[in-house]
Amino acid sequence: MTTTLDPDLADQIGLPGTFAATACTNCGVCTAVCPAGLDLLPRRLMHLVLLGAADRLRAETETIYSCLLCGLCEEQCPAGVRITDTMRALRHYCNRTTFGL
Amino acid sequence: MSEPSPADRRIGVYVCSCGGNISDYVDVPQVIERVRDEPGVVVARRAMFTCSDATQQEIIADIRQQRLDGLVVASCSPKLHTETFRAVARRAGLNPYQYTQVNIREQCSWAHTDDHDGATGKAIGLVRAGIARTARTRPLEPITVETVPRALVIGGGITGLRAALALADLGLGVFLVEREATLGGWVGGFGAMFPHDRDGRTLIAGLVDRVRAREEITVFTGAEVVSRSGSFGNYRAGIRVSGTGTGIGANGGPDPKTAESITVEVGAVLVATGFDTYEPGEGELGYGQGGVLTLPQFKTLVDATDGPLTHQGRPVRTIAYIYCVGSRQPHGTPGANEHCSRFCCTATVHTALRVSARDASVRQYHLYRDMRSYGKYELLFDASRRAGSRYLKVVDDQPPEVAAQDGPAGGLTVTAHDALAGGEELALPVDLVVLVTGAVPRANEELTGVLKIPVGTDRFYNEIHPKLRPVETVVDGVTIAGACQGPKTSIEAVTSGLAAVAQSAAILKRGHAELDPLVAVVDPLACGWCDRCQDSCPYGAIGRAKRGESEVAVIDETVCKGCGGCVPVCPRDAIDLHGYTDTQITSMIDGLAEAVA
C-alpha cells in the first residue's frame, strides 16, 4: 500500500517547541531500549511524523497509546529528541482526528 | 674497454625475509648457501627487513669495507624498492646502476605458497640471474637535460587558474590554455558554494584579475593544445587559437591575438581539464518533463533570485532531491559510472540549507542511497536536518519513480521505498524534483592522444601512484590536477593543483633534470640504416644521421624510455640497451637455467 505524504503534518500535530526529531539520525538506540516492545518503535514513529505519513500515523493509535512515557528512550537519545513530549502531542492529534474528541 | 671479469667482481647479496612474507615459503638460509659461491660474490647475508634503516646501514658499511662493486637485493617488486637501494648504493659511493633488485616476493613466495621446495628453487635461480647481471654491469651516469623555466597549464578553471598563479609566484613563466571563450570553468558559473558560502563567480573573478595582472602568465582562451613534441624539460606544444585569443604576449611569445596556431616551448605540462556533469537520459527519473532539474540547473535557479523560489511561473513549496544520479551505477553495465562523485551530497545539502534560510516553510525531501557529506561537511548535513530537511533512504534495487500528477495544478509525484520507514512505499507530492547529478570524465580524446596520458577504466586520467605520486603521470614532466583525475570538490581540486605546481617546480627551478641512463644505444659501426628500429619506437626517439658516406640511426636519449622495443628488430644487432645489454640478459638466462638443472 502506498502512503501519500502530507508535508504539513508536523504543523498540524502542533508539536511542542521542544520537539527535536529533525535531529534524529535513525541510530536506533530508542528502539533498543524500549521496554514496552511497541509495534511501531520510537525511531520509526518519529520518522513517519517527520515525513508527514498522516494516514499511517492515524492507524497507529494502538502504539501511540501503549507507550509508557517512561522516558528511557529520551534519556539515551544522543540527538536529544523529546520523544515523550512528541508522544503526548501525537495523542492529542489522534484524539482530534481519529476519535473526534 | 677493460672491465673486470665476472669472477673478479666484488658483489654483495642480501636476501630478505620480509618478516615472513618471503621466509614463510622460501628457505632463505638455503638460498644464501646456494648463491654464496657464485662468481664475484664476496658478501651474502639474510635480513628480516632489508629495507629497514638498520639493514641499509649494514649494506652501506659492507660496500665501504668490502669495496663492493655490485649490489643485489632479493626482496620485493622493483616497483617498490629499486630507488631505495639505488640510494643506498649512492650513499655508500657505489654507482647506483650497479645495483640489481631481484623479486622473490610477488613473483615467487606469494605466487607459490603451496610449494615451498619449488619456491626455494625458483628463488635460488632468480638470485643467481641477478648476480650474473650485476657481474656484467658497469657504472652509468644519469642523463642531464636543461629545462625550460616555463609551464603549460591546460584548463582555466579554478584549479588551472590557481596553479598558474602559484607557478608565477615561483618565478616561472606560464602559458594558460582554456578551450572555452572565457576563463572560470564550473566554479565561474556558481553562486554561493560550500563550505563557507562564498560566491563561485566572485572567487573566479578575483583569480582572473590576478592572473591577468601577471606578466609571467600568457592566457589563451578559445584555444586547444593540438600537438606536443620534444622531450621532458623541453616540450614544444602547438596551440590552436580559434575565435578570440586574449593573451598578453609575454614571455617573448608571439602575440596570440593575431596568431591562429602557435608553438610554445615549456619544461612541464600541468593538465587541469576538469569534468563534465552527468546528463540524465531522456525519461531517466522523469528527466525531460517540466519540474525535473539536474543539480547544476537547480543551483542556477537558486542563484537567480533572492526572493521566493519559483519554477516556470509556479511557486516551489516542496522539493524532492534524488541522489546518486549518474554516479555509483551498477558494476558490469558497459560504460557505467561506478565512482562516487564526492561533491554532490554536500553540494545538495548546502543548497537545501540556502533554500531553508530563505523560506523555512519550503518542504525538502532527500532521497539518498548513502549520505557522504564526509569530514567537516557532516556539520552541514546536521544543520540541514535541524533546518527541516527530511531524509529517506532508498535501497538500490527499488529506485524511486517520478511521474507527473494528474489534474490542472501540475506538480510531480515521487514514489519511493523508504528503508527508514521499514521499506514502505511512500508517495511524495512535490513541485520540483532535483536529480543530484555527479561528475563524469570529459570527452578529451584529442588532448589525451596528444599528451599520451594514461586513462583508467573509469575514463579519468591516471596518476602513477595514488598515495605517493598523486599528480605525476608516466609521461615525464606532465602532471594532472583537479577533477580530470577523478571527482573532487573545488577544495581538493585546488590542493592537487598546488601539488602539481610543486612537482613541476621541483624540475623547472633547478634548471636541469636527471633522467635514467637506461636507454638504447646504436653502434654506428654496425648500423646499416634500414629504418626498422625507427618504425618500432613508440616514442619517436629514433632519427637518422650522416656518418661519412652512409647513414646511421641515432637515438635521442632524452626521448628514449628504455623499453627495448628496437633491440630485437635490428637485423645487424647494432642496438643495445644500457642496463639490460644482450650480454647481461643472456647471463641471467644462464643463471636461471643452471638452477633449474
Image (tube, rainbow, N blue to C red):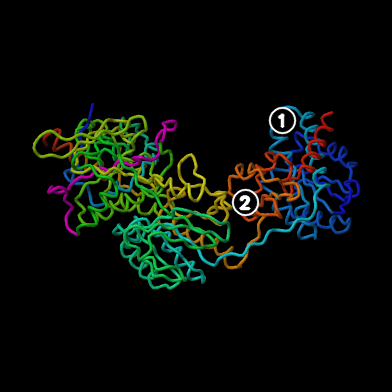
Q: Give the camera-side residue of B336 and B560.
A: B560
Q: Secondary structure at mark 2?
A: strand
Residue interval drawn in magenta: B306-335
Q: Amino acid at mark 2?
A: Gly
Quickly name the residue at label 1: B112
Question: How would you rate the neighbour count of disc 2 (Cα within 10 Å): few for under 14, some for 14-19, many for 20 or more?
Answer: few
Residue in the image at 86% along x and 52% along y: B3
Which quadrant, please, contains the C terminus of chain B? Answer: top right
Q: Secondary structure at mark 1?
A: loop
Q: Give the camera-side residue of B90 and B581.
A: B581
* Majority secondary structure of magenta residues: loop
Determine the CA span between mark 2 and mark 1. 45 Å
Q: Relative to residue B96, is residue A38 drawn left or right?
A: left
Q: Give the camera-side residue of A41 and B307.
A: B307
Q: Relative to residue B11, is residue B346 drawn left or right?
A: left
Q: Earlier in the sequence, mark 2 or mark 1?
A: 1
Q: Is label 2 on the same chain as label 1?
A: yes
Chain containing the residue with disc 1: B
Question: How would you rate the neighbour count of disc 1 (Cα within 10 Å): few for under 14, some for 14-19, many for 20 or more?
Answer: some
Q: For the residues carrying marks 2 and 1, which lies nearer the camera in this image?
A: 2
Q: Give the camera-side residue of A30 and B219.
A: B219
**How far across and how far down the image is residue B225, in percent?**
43, 55
**How far across and how far down the image is residue B160, in percent?**
43, 60
